């Protein structure tokens, strides 16, 4: 916009005068154009009304054609041979007479409900079927008269428009369909005979937009689909008028009747040639345009002649005077000037201005002389520059410091005295200050730079400030800059800033909360770590007492600080605890005296280390120890129960007692091995079965899904399985080398059914007369421990038992369905610790789909340790390298002590930081990849845990 404004300001006055004339003529031109446009619109409206009259005329003709067809079919329906609805020569002859009496029709037919021809006006033609014709289907469905569309007759082979009507019985039900075929050629001839104006065009189309007849060039368009814009008019709400090119490309004003208007079922349009009618309007428009352009040209010529005589001469006189002033000739005057009163006043104003400027210039020169005398003796560097920033004067102090004389310093020469490292920045800052004159901001120039002190050959820091020198009008006319030597002060500030920076870095990077208190226990300094513990920003602590900023801890911290102030001795390893945002936390505090210059104690320095994580790990380990003790007590209780049951069963037979007891304790030991490998969380049911039947591999077959029993259900299940195996080895199929045992288990609703099928053993004679203690032990464990029951079927070929185990016995419940590759994860307890919410949510969803029980997710190290402590035991954990910037090494150690499988979430290029024992899951993470990696890690861990036991 600024560029455009400058261009407009540069236009000659003659052009502005011409523009004014043009603007004055624009309203008249607009009025002329509007009048011409209204006349043209009125003519177009008249043509539209005329087209609507013609289209209604054509529509009435087509309505008569449709009504005639309706009457013909009414007479057909009244004939007995037609109503009989069966083929007959009489019916065919009747239809032939109708066609002969009405040459417009190519064919007349009668069809049954299946669309099969019954009677034909051309009996020599083969029987036809029209069940696929839309008009036939509508006639039957709607039970009324129908207008078809463009078609090639199947009996005549000619272009035709079909009409159909239902043949009803006395009750009004449609028994068949009557049909007559109107000749398209007859319809075209009828349309061409309509009294339409020359150059017009009438079109008739069916409900699908296919042209049935056209008065102009019918051979080209009949049977073709209308263009898209016409298709949109088929189902318009009412008749309308439009101005558009017709099918042949000629622009016409057209009126149309849509399908929903009489004649129903046909689209009718009539277009009148608009080019001839509007030719006169176009000629009038062109004539008006020529008149407007001619008047503008004439006005321009007259304006140039008048402007030259009245304006240009006095303007040249004024310009000549201004050029003299530019040459510093302030004695030049405009004097008397021609061109009218306005130019005379302008000349007088110019002369008055010249006298004022000459007076101010003399005063400026006098003030400049005085200022030069002052700055010549000032102990500061002073430079002046012109409007373009070129130095044109320096004071004596500059020459004393730099050794550069006036000639060497002018222009950009002064930069030679600037340190090479500061030179480019100083020049850039100077140019930016100069450039600001153009946008009107003109901020002061301010720059620190090193200047060479020539006498001592050393660099000293100077602070240069500069600003434009402005005229009385405020316009910048020159620049001045002053340089102040502040080398010593800057060095002192740099030393102080360096010391402060070291202190700030120590406070911010320390892995502990740090603070500095005065003798009144007000905060002098504090880092963010300790400020967050107190729940306030670090800046809010300064000048406030410990009682106002940390009231929950002040009662225990303040005495220790007072002791340091009074004794001058540090207080170390003070352990405190308190609530932070409702969570109990623990700290290890140490306080040290801060001495002043006189040796007195001026304050206290504090270091507070958060040991909450360590405390939680210790608590978790104590809980784990208690859990181990609890499980050991449970094992001893089970063993004592087994001894009592076995002793009751063996009575006085000591060898039998030993054998039974060893078998049951061995079964208990085997399931304990499985649970120990799984960290007493859950156990794979198939592993327990395989362990119990390991010595009978050739006689046993297993089949069933992967299911995990809870730790509480694993022992009872192992005991039930052991008793069944012991009975089979003694009395059943496993007592013979050729005996077979099949175990099949499946999920049924919220229960698991396990079939125990024996074959090839001694023949069973029926239900045993005596129920042993082993059977009682089985029933007791199935009911109380496994929430189920045992069904026994004493079949002659072998025992068939069905173990019905309740869903509560399975880790995570009985799964309804699992994806392939996820079966081994069902019931697993998995800890998720991740500080990326999106990734954490995606992993949680994938693990839930796999049937896992989730622990977490936790976004921080403290939260992860807390949920681990609450959960007690887990099967696996997913960990990144850090949580919110804190290493997870403590969490890994806690998990390792629990023998938990840890899967490392490795970023791209981050695999090298994962410890060797950890399995790594690289990005990008996918649900299937996560399930496969976790399953593989659990399998490896299980195999590694089983190796020592096998040895």
Image (tube, grey):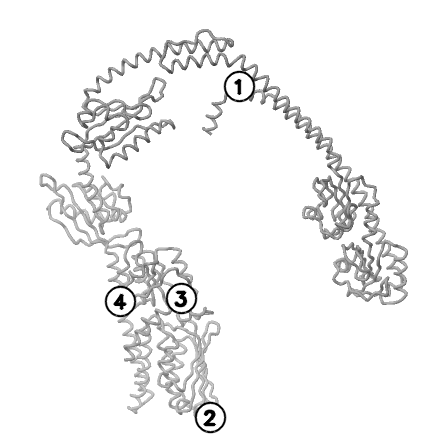
Q: Quadrant of residue 327?
A: top left
Name the residue carrying label 1: 14
Reading the chain from its start, which is encountered first: label 3 or label 4?
Answer: 4
User: Where residue 415 appears, x then y in whole percent?
Assistant: 25, 30
Q: Quadrant of residue 754?
A: bottom left
User: Where residue 236 appears, x then y in whole percent?
Assistant: 70, 46
The residues bearing labels 1 and 2 have C-alpha atoms spaced at a distance of 132 Å
Name the residue carrying label 3: 931
Q: Secondary structure at mark 2?
A: loop
How packed is label 4: few (under 14 Cα within 10 Å), some, or many (20 or more)?
A: few
In terms of depth relative to the viewer, which is nearer, 276 or 614?
A: 276
Q: Is residue 760 above or below residue 782?
A: below
Q: Of the numbered discs in the image, which one, if any, rests on residue 897?
A: 4
How packed is label 2: few (under 14 Cα within 10 Å), some, or many (20 or more)?
A: few
Q: Secondary structure at mark 1?
A: helix
Q: Secondary structure at mark 4?
A: helix
């Amino acid at each position: 916009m600024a560029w455009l404004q400058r261009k407009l300001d540069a236009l000659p006055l003659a052009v502005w005068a011409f523009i004014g004339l043009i603007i004055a003529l624009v309203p008249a031109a607009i009025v002329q154009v509007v009048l011409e446009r209204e006349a043209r619109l009125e003519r177009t409206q008249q043509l539209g009304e005329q087209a609507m009259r013609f289209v209604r005329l054509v529509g009435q003709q087509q309505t008569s054609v449709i009504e005639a067809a309706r009457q013909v079919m009414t007479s057909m329906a009244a004939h007995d041979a037609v109503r009989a609805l069966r083929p007959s020569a009489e019916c065919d002859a009747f239809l032939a007479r109708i066609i002969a009496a009405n040459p417009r029709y190519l064919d007349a037919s009668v069809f049954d409900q299946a669309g099969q021809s019954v009677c034909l006006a051309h009996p020599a033609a083969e029987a036809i079927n029209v069940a696929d014709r839309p008009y036939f289907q509508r006639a039957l469905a709607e039970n009324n008269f129908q207008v078809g569309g463009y078609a090639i007759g199947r009996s005549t082979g000619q272009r035709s428009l079909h009409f159909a009507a239902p043949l009803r019985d006395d009750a009004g039900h449609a028994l068949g369909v009557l049909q007559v075929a109107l000749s398209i050629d007859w319809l075209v001839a009828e349309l061409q005979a309509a009294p339409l104006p020359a150059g017009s065009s009438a079109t008739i189309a069916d409900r699908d937009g296919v042209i049935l007849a056209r008065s102009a060039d019918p051979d080209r368009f009949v049977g073709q689909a209308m263009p898209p814009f016409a298709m949109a008019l088929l189902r318009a709400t009412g008749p309308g008028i439009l101005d558009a090119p017709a099918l042949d490309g000629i622009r016409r004003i057209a009126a149309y009747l849509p399908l929903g208007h009489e004649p129903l079922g046909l689209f009718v349009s009539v277009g009148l040639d608009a080019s001839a009618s509007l030719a006169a309007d176009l000629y009038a428009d062109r004539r008006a345009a020529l008149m407007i352009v001619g008047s503008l040209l004439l006005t321009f010529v007259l304006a140039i002649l008048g402007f030259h005589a009245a304006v240009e001469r006095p303007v040249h006189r004024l310009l000549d005077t201004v050029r003299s002033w530019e040459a510093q000739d302030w004695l030049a005057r405009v004097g008397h000037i021609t061109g009218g009163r306005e130019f005379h006043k302008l000349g007088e104003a110019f002369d008055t201005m010249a006298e004022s400027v000459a007076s101010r210039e003399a005063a400026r020169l006098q003030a400049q002389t005085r200022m030069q005398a002052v700055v010549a003796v000032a102990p500061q560097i002073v430079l002046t520059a012109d409007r373009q920033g070129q130095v044109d004067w320096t004071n004596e102090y500059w020459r004393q410091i730099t050794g550069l004389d006036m000639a060497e310093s002018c222009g950009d020469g002064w930069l030679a005295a600037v340190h090479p490292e500061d030179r480019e920045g100083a020049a850039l800052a100077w140019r930016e200050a100069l450039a600001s004159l153009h946008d009107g901001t003109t901020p002061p120039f301010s720059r620190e730079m090193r200047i060479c002190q020539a006498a001592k050959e050393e660099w000293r820091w100077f602070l240069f400030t500069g600003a434009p020198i402005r005229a009385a009008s405020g316009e910048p006319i020159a620049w001045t800059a002053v340089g102040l030597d502040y080398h010593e002060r800057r060095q002192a500030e740099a030393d102080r800033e360096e010391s402060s920076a070291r202190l700030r870095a120590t406070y911010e990077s320390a892995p502990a909360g740090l603070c500095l208190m005065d003798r009144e226990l007000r905060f002098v300094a504090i880092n963010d770590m300790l400020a967050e513990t107190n729940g306030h920003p670090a800046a809010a602590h300064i000048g406030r007492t410990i009682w106002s900023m940390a009231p929950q801890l002040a009662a225990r911290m303040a005495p220790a600080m007072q002791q340091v102030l009074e004794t001058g001795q540090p207080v170390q390893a003070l352990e405190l605890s308190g609530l932070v945002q409702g969570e109990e936390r623990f700290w290890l505090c140490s306080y040290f005296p801060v001495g002043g210059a006189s040796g007195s104690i001026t304050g206290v320095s504090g270091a507070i280390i958060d040991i909450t994580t360590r405390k939680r790990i210790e608590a978790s380990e104590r809980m784990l120890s208690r859990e181990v003790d609890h499980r050991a007590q449970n094992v001893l209780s089970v063993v004592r129960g087994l001894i009592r049951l076995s002793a009751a069963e063996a009575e006085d037979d000591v060898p039998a007692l030993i054998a039974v007891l060893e078998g049951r304790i061995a079964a208990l030991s085997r399931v304990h091995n499985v649970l120990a490998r799984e960290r007493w969380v859950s156990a794979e049911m198939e592993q327990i079965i395989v362990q119990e039947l390991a010595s009978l591999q050739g006689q046993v077959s297993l089949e069933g899904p992967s299911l995990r029993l809870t730790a509480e259900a694993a022992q009872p299940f192992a005991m039930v399985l052991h008793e069944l195996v012991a009975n089979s080895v003694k009395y059943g199929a496993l007592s013979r080398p050729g005996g077979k045992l099949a175990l099949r288990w499946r999920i049924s609703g919220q229960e698991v059914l396990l079939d125990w099928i024996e074959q090839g053993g001694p023949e069973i004679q029926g239900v045993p007369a005596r129920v042993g203690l082993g059977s009682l032990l089985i029933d007791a464990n199935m009911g109380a421990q496994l929430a189920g029951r045992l069904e026994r079927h004493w079949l002659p070929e072998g025992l068939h038992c069905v173990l019905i185990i309740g869903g509560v016995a399975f880790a995570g419940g009985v799964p309804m369905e699992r994806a392939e590759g996820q079966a081994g994860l069902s019931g697993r307890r998995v800890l998720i610790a991740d500080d990326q919410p999106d990734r954490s949510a995606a992993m949680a969803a994938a693990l839930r789909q796999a049937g896992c029980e989730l622990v977490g997710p936790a976004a921080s190290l403290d939260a992860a340790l807390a949920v681990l402590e609450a959960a007690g035991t887990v099967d696996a954990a997913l960990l990144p390298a850090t949580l919110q910037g804190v290493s997870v090494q403590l969490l890994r150690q806690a998990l390792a002590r629990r023998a938990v499988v840890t899967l490392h979430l490795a970023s791209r290029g981050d695999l090298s930081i994962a410890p060797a024992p950890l399995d790594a899951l690289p990005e990008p993470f996918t649900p299937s990849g996560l399930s496969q990696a976790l399953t593989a890690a659990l399998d490896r861990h299980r195999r590694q845990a089983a190796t020592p036991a096998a040895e």
